[in-house]
């Protein structure tokens, strides 16, 4: 019988930090970290010293003082006496608005173009290839400026709507396209309108419940319920019924030409439209390529097998190919959403009041607090990017390949 | 080296860097060119001409300083700055001085740590509207869309004006004058507001200048003048007294044409001190005795510069008004050369 004894413990020697592969990487990382800290300390110290020499300091009191300027698109109450902090919040909301809108439309454009690019129809696939190549290879700033310039140059000014024989007329008498933006009728919320809104939200939940029920029924019994028209019916019929029953509590406030501009209704400003549309079609082209790559990553055998079972091409795409393609599509899609959010800072080119324009533009310039404002901007974009990334990763985990 | 001595050394290095940046006059002399911040283009004040050469009222100040310091009015590197980039460019040392229709305000002088060396144009904010709009007063602009250069004092005055008159407006923020002009002409805004001189200059470049009117209201005081970094008094003195030399030259009748003759033959002691034939004013500034002669010869005295670039004979057609010499009822006044 042999007795196994532990090998003698090697005592730690200083030279092992260099010679022993177990410690070497740690040593070098430690040195790199130290160098990094010193470098940053040097830069920060240099900055503070030079600021002090110039009689300046880093302070955030300016955030509380009145901003003094007006903003053309505010989602919350704001006037020129509001604080700089509030102006920054207005900018943040505007950034989030355009990023949210552009993410949705870019996804729609991208998925459509990506699927169509693989179409068997030669014309359709070539048209989509043309769209993708044109938009992907020209910088987004150029697109923003092109679209904005076209809007201001081609669309009529509000004064063209004036007079007995105006040069321009409103679409359906209620929508005006002008070079300052699009004016739409706005809803007026009368008494009882909240019931209608609540019904509508309940209907949305109802649609999801119905679709889940249909899926479960399909998996359990193989019986396929229609989902298209019942979803639409659940979405709109109850709301319409309640709307009529409650005595039509929601009216419309039409824009009218008064004074210099249209007043009343909702104004969607030209800068927002230009930025939104440009970001959508530009990023849509990238998403189209992601979608195409994702679809092509799914083995052709899957399509053939599904077809052999007798599924129609639309079903093959929706039920077999796209769900598998999603695992490949989602991770790069996250980057595209981040890109949209970051590219929205190009808003400055068309005078859209996003965070870069308010906090990083006017406030920075009026107060001269460049370092403070830029630090806040960095913090904002970092937070937003990490949040989008986190949310999308949760979604990615829910669709990625389940290994059992 | 332990950490505290390392940081100590770095601190000293930082101070040294700060101290080295202080002697702008020496820097300019050593470099051989003056870095002068101007606008990105406002005809009459600062804009490149057909040959790409910078011309204008503000440009003349840069050239006069370059002539005084370096002996060559063309030794200027013009750095175009927007309303947003101008102060950073000056504070960071990218430019030695800013001559860019910039309004002298308390907070810029005190809080942003700049030194305004004087006023080369007394201005006020006005409004321009198309004649077809039928507006005759700025108080009728309720609900109007207003094009405004962002990050300027005009932006703040605009908000104050509409607030004080209890009327509303919608701002269209733009970055440069060229952009504002394009938006205004396309009808994307009803009115364009900036300094009245800027409006006159912009209107002069229109195809049909007479289709546009400047409204009578001047809603603010806008003393425009060159500025330098705070804390470099020697350099501030050089720029300040170069500007004053141009103003005094007009007052005393010294022009670019007769400056040499005046220097040789004058019997007026103040002219003699100004032109360096008597006293040691140039030496006190750290320059030679001929500094002001060169500054005046570069583009002419204040009146000549005004007449050549923005005066009534030019397309911009600004009257002297407040910018006449104090002897003619204006505000232009230089402290004495003695």
Image: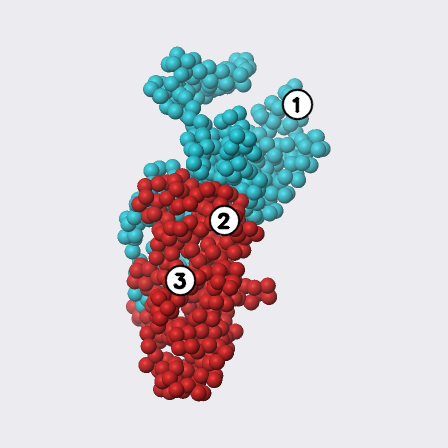
Q: Which chain is cyan?
A: A
- Mark 2 / mark 3, whichever is N-terminal: 2
Residue at the image position 31 percent from the left and 70 percent from the top: B8
Whole-percent x, y for residue A103 in the image: 49, 37
Determine whether the residue tagged by mark 2 lies in a helix, strand or loop: strand
Q: In this orientation, which residue lies closer to the viewer: A333 or B25?
A: B25
The crowding category of the residue bearing disc 3, from other C-alpha atoms within 10 Å (few below 14, some 14 to 19, many at least 20), is: few
Front residue of B100 and B326: B326
Q: Which residue is mark 2?
A: B212
Label 2, label 3: how far apart the Cα atoms are: 21 Å
Image chain in red: B
Dot 3 corresponds to which residue? B321
**Residue drawn 30% across and 65% down?**
A55
- Image depth: mark 1 or mark 2 in front: 2
Marks 1, 3: nearer the viewer: 3
Point out residue A113 in the picture as x, y percentages from the top left corner: 61, 34
Verify CB contact (< 8 Å) between mark 1 and mark 3: no
Pointer 1: what residue?
Answer: A307
In the depicted view, which residue is nearer to us: A160 or A309?
A160
Query: Which of the numbered marks, if any, corresponds to residue B23?
Result: none
């Amino acid at each position: 019988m042999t007795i196994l004894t532990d090998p003698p413990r090697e005592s730690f020697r200083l030279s092992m930090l260099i010679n022993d592969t177990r410690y070497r990487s740690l040593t070098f990382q430690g040195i790199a970290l130290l160098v990094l800290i010193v470098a940053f300390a040097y830069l920060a110290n240099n900055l503070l010293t030079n600021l002090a020499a110039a009689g300046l300091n880093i302070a955030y009191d300016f955030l509380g003082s009145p901003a003094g300027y007006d903003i053309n698109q505010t989602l919350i109450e704001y006037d020129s006496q509001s604080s700089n902090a509030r102006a920054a919040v207005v900018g943040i909301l505007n950034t989030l608005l355009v990023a949210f809108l552009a993410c949705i439309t870019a996804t729609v454009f991208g998925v459509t173009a990506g699927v169509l690019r693989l179409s068997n129809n030669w014309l359709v696939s070539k048209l989509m290839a043309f769209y993708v190549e044109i938009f992907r290879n020209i910088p987004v700033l150029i697109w923003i400026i092109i679209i904005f310039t076209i809007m201001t140059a081609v669309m009529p000014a509000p004064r063209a709507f004036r007079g007995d024989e105006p040069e321009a007329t409103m679409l359906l008498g209620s929508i005006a396209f002008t070079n300052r933006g699009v004016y739409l009728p706005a809803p007026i919320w009368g008494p009882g309108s909240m019931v209608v809104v609540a019904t509508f939200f309940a209907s949305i939940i109802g649609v999801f419940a119905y679709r889940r029920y249909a899926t479960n029924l399909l998996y359990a019994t193989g019986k396929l319920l229609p989902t298209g028209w019942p979803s639409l019916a659940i979405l709109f019929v109850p709301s319409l019924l309640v709307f009529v029953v409650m005595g039509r509590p929601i009216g419309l406030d039409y824009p009218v030409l008064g004074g210099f501009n249209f007043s009343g209704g909702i104004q969607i400003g030209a800068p927002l439209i230009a930025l939104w549309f440009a970001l959508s079609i530009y990023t849509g082209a990238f998403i189209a390529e992601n979608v195409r790559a994702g679809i092509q990553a799914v083995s052709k055998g899957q399509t053939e097998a599904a077809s052999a079972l007798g599924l129609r091409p639309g079903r093959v795409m929706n039920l077999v190919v796209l769900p598998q393609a999603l695992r490949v599509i989602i991770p790069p899609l996250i980057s595209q959403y981040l890109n949209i959010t970051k590219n929205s800072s190009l808003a400055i080119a068309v005078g859209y009041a996003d965070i870069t324009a308010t906090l990083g533009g006017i406030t920075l310039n009026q107060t001269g607090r460049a370092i403070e404002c830029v630090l806040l901007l960095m913090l904002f974009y970092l937070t937003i990017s990490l949040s989008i990334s986190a949310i999308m990763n949760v979604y990615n985990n829910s669709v990625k390949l389940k290994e059992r | 080296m332990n950490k505290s001595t390392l940081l100590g050394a770095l601190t000293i290095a930082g101070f040294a860097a700060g101290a080295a940046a202080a002697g702008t006059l020496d820097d300019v002399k050593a470099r051989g060119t003056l870095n002068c911040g101007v606008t990105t283009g406002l005809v009459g004040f600062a804009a490149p001409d057909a040959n790409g050469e910078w011309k204008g009222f503000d440009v003349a100040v840069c050239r006069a300083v370059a002539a005084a310091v370096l002996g060559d009015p063309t030794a200027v590197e013009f750095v175009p700055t927007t309303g947003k980039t101008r102060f950073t460019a000056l504070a960071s040392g990218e430019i030695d001085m800013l001559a860019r229709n910039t309004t002298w305000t308390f907070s810029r002088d005190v809080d942003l740590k700049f030194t305004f060396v004087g006023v080369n144009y007394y201005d006020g904010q006005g409004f321009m509207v198309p004649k077809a709009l039928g507006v005759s007063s700025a108080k009728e602009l309720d609900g109007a869309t207003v094009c405004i250069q962002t990050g300027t004092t005009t932006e703040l005055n605009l908000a104050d004006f509409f607030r004080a008159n209890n009327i509303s407006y919608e701002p269209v923020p733009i970055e440069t004058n060229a952009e504002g002009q394009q938006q205004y002409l396309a009808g994307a805004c009803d009115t364009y507001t900036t300094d009245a001189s800027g409006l006159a200059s912009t209107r002069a470049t229109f195809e049909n200048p007479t289709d546009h009117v400047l409204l009578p209201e001047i809603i603010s005081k806008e003393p425009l003048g060159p500025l330098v970094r705070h804390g470099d008094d020697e350099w501030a003195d050089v720029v300040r007294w170069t500007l004053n030399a141009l103003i005094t030259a007009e007052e005393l009748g010294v022009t670019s044409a007769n400056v040499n003759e005046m220097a040789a033959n004058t019997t007026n002691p103040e002219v003699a001190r100004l032109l360096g034939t008597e006293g040691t004013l140039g030496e006190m500034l750290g320059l030679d005795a001929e500094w002001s002669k060169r500054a005046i010869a570069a583009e002419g005295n204040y009146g000549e510069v005004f007449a050549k670039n923005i005066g009534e004979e030019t397309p911009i057609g600004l009257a002297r008004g407040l910018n006449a010499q104090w002897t003619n009822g204006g505000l232009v006044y230089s402290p004495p050369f003695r």
